[in-house]
Image (spheres, rainbow, N blue to C red):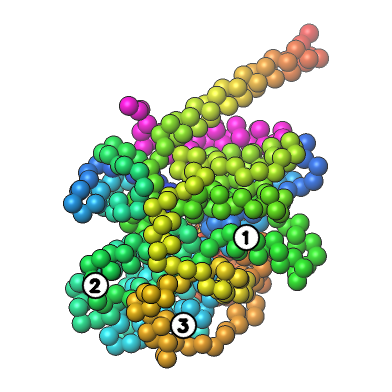
C-alpha cells in the first residue's frame, strides 16, 4: 500500500491547498494539508494516500548518490589493483 | 538551484553497480562478525524490496533476514474485519476503506464478500475521497474504516479535521490505527513465553521509514538504548536496503549500538510536527489492541478522543458490533511469521491451500505480506 516513488510538484492551488504532481509521468493531485515545510513548484515530495508527506531533501539525495559513485569508483580502483597484484603474483607470467 | 532529476532518483537508488559495490563492502565486513546477525525488517515495504531484488542471495551466510509484522493489513484481526462487515451490511451505510483490506477474510467472509451480498463497500485511494462520497450520498452514512501505522494516521486525522471544520454530518470513523514501537517492543519482550532462542532471532532492526517520515526516527531510540538492538531507518529502494545492512554490520564490527538514519532524504529525527500535532488533537492510546497472530499488545492502538465520540462508529454502533474473540486458522503460522520466528515456506499450506487467490491468513492477502512476497518472488529463493 505504500509507494516510495518521489513526485515532482507541477502546480499548486493555493485556495484548496492541493498540489498537482508528476509521478513517473503520471499526473496526480495531493493535499498539502499535512506538510510542514513550504512547497514550491519543482520540489520533490513523497505522496502517501493522497497527501504530500514530506519534501525530498535534494541535498541529501544528491549527497547519497555522490557517495555511491565514489564507492563504485573506489571499488573499481581496488578491483583494478587487485587484478594487477594478482597478475604480479602469477607464477605463469614467465 | 539543483540538478536533481526524477530519473536520478529512480536509477540512482536502484543502480545495479551500486548494489554490487555494497555487496562487496558487506561481504568484507561480514567476515569480521563474531556471530551471525538476524536483521528484522519490520515493514512489508522492505520485505517486498528484499524479495523483489533477491537481496538475501546477495548477502553472506552470516546475515539473515527475519520478516516482521509487515503491513497494517497483515495484522488486522478478524474481529475488526467482522466489525467492518457488519457495518457495511447496514442499509444506510457506505463502508469506505483503503488498499487490500477489502480482501482480508473475516469470520463471515471479506468485505468483498459483503459487497457481493449487496453491501456498499468502497475502496479509495485517499481518505479524502470520503468527502466526495459523503457529498454525493447525503442520505447515507459514510463509515471510514481507518487502517494503518503512524504513516496513515495523520491522513485520518486530516479527514476528521475537515469533517469538523466543514461541519459534515454523514462521515463516521472506525479507527484501527496501530503504532510500531509497541509491537517491536512486544517482539523482543515476548521471548519468555516462546522458544528460548527467540530473543536471538532479532539482532537489529531495519526501521520502517514512512512511519518515521511522520514520527521521526526518535520513536526507535529505546531499542539501541534499552534493548541493545541497533536500528537503521532504511529507505525502500534496493540500494537503500543494501546501504542500511552495511550500516548495521559496521555497527556490530565497531561495537556500536545506535539509531541511525539511512533514509536522510526523507526522514529526520523529529519527523513531521504538523502531522504529529493533528494526530494528538484527535487520537489517544487505547490500552490494548489485538494484532493478528500476535495477540493483545499494550498501548499499541489508537482511538478517537472521547470528545469526538459522536463521530466514532464503534460508539454509535456499539450494540450491533460483534464482540466474540476469534482464533486464527489452525494451520496458519502467520503469527510466527509476524514474530520473525518462521518463514512462509515453513507453513504446511503455503502455496497449496493458501495462495493469493485463496488466502487463508492475511500474510498472503496483503500484496506486501511476507507470504505473498514469497509466493510472488519465490523463484528467487
Ligand atoms: S503500509 Fe507500507 S510503509 Fe506502512 S508498514 Fe505497510 S508496507 Fe510499510
Ligand atoms: S501461507 Fe497462508 S496460512 Fe500459511 S502462514 Fe502464510 S498466510 Fe498463513
| Tag of residue B67 | none
Q: Can residue B218 be seen in this view?
A: yes
Q: Distance between the Cα atoms at labels 2 and 1?
A: 37 Å
N-terminal of the two: label 2 or label 3? 3
Residue that badge 1 annotates: B184
The secondary structure that most of the magenta stretch takes on is helix
Q: Is mark 1 within 8 Å of ligand 1?
A: no
Q: Residue A88's x, y, as percent?
A: 75, 12
Q: Residue B57's x, y, as percent?
A: 64, 46
Q: Is residue B4 magenta?
A: yes
Q: Distance between the Cα atoms at labels 3 and 1?
A: 26 Å
Q: Can residue B95 be seen in this view?
A: no
Residue that badge 3 annotates: B82
Q: Which residue is drawn at 44% across and 67% down?
A: B283
Q: Which residue lies furthest to the front in this view?
A: B307
- Mark 2 vs mark 1: give the one in front: 2
Secondary element at image label 3: helix
Residue that badge 2 annotates: B168
Residue B250, image quadrant: top right
Chain for disc number 3: B
Give the residues in magenta: B1-29
Secondary element at image label 2: loop
Chain for disc number 2: B
Q: Does the magenta stretch include residue B95?
A: no
Amino acid at each position: 500500500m505504500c509507494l516510495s516513488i518521489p513526485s515532482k510538484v507541477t502546480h499548486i492551488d493555493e485556495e484548496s491547498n492541493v498540489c498537482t504532481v508528476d509521478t513517473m509521468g503520471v499526473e496526480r493531485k495531493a493535499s498539502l494539508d499535512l506538510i510542514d515545510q513550504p512547497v514550491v513548484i519543482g520540489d520533490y515530495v513523497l505522496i502517501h494516500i493522497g497527501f504530500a508527506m514530506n519534501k525530498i531533501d535534494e541535498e541529501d539525495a544528491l549527497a547519497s548518490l555522490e557517495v555511491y559513485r565514489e564507492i563504485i569508483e573506489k571499488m573499481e580502483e581496488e578491483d583494478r589493483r587487485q587484478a594487477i597484484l594478482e597478475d604480479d603474483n602469477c607464477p605463469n607470467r614467465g | 538551484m539543483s540538478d536533481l532529476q526524477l530519473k536520478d532518483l529512480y536509477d540512482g537508488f536502484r543502480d545495479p553497480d551500486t548494489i554490487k559495490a555494497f555487496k562487496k563492502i558487506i561481504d568484507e565486513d561480514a567476515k569480521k562478525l563474531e556471530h551471525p546477525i538476524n536483521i528484522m525488517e519490520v515493514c512489508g515495504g522492505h520485505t517486498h524490496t528484499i524479495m523483489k531484488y533477491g537481496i538475501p542471495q546477495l548477502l553472506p551466510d552470516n546475515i539473515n533476514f527475519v520478516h516482521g509484522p509487515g503491513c497494517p493489513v497483515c495484522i488486522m484481526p478478524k474481529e475488526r474485519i467482522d466489525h467492518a462487515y457488519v457495518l457495511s451490511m447496514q442499509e444506510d451505510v457506505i463502508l469506505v476503506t483503503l488498499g487490500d483490506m477489502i480482501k482480508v477474510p473475516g469470520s463471515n467472509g471479506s468485505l468483498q464478500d459483503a459487497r457481493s451480498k449487496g453491501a456498499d463497500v468502497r475502496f479509495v485511494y485517499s481518505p479524502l475521497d470520503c468527502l466526495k462520497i459523503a457529498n454525493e450520498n447525503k442520505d447515507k452514512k459514510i463509515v471510514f474504516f481507518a487502517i494503518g501505522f503512524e504513516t496513515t494516521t495523520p491522513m485520518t486525522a486530516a479527514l476528521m479535521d475537515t469533517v469538523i471544520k466543514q461541519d459534515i454530518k454523514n462521515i463516521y470513523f472506525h479507527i484501527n490505527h496501530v503504532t510500531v514501537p509497541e509491537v517491536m517492543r512486544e517482539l523482543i519482550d515476548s521471548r519468555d513465553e516462546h522458544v528460548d532462542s527467540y530473543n536471538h532471532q532479532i539482532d537489529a532492526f531495519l526501521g520502517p521509514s514512512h512511519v518515521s517520515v511522520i514520527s521521526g526516527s526518535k520513536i526507535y531510540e529505546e531499542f539501541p538504548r534499552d534493548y541493545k538492538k541497533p536500528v537503521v531507518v532504511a529507505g525502500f529502494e534496493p540500494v537503500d536496503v543494501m546501504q542500511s545492512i552495511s550500516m548495521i554490520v559496521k555497527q556490530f564490527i565497531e561495537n556500536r549500538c545506535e539509531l541511525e538514519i539511512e533514509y536522510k532524504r526523507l526522514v529526520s529525527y523529529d519527523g513531521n510536527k504538523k502531522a504529529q500535532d493533528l494526530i494528538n488533537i484527535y487520537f489517544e492510546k487505547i490500552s490494548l489492541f489485538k494484532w493478528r497472530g500476535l495477540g493483545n499488545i499494550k498501548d499499541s492502538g489508537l482511538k478517537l478522543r472521547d470528545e469526538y465520540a459522536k463521530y466514532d462508529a464503534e460508539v454509535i454502533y456499539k450494540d450491533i458490533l460483534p464482540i466474540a474473540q476469534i482464533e486464527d486458522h489452525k494451520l496458519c503460522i502467520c503469527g510466527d511469521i509476524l514474530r520473525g520466528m518462521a518463514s512462509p515456506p515453513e507453513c504446511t499450506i503455503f502455496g497449496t491451500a493458501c495462495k493469493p487467490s485463496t488466502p487463508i491468513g492475511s500474510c498472503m492477502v496483503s500484496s506486501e505480506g511476507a507470504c505473498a512476497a514469497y509466493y510472488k518472488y519465490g523463484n528467487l529463493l
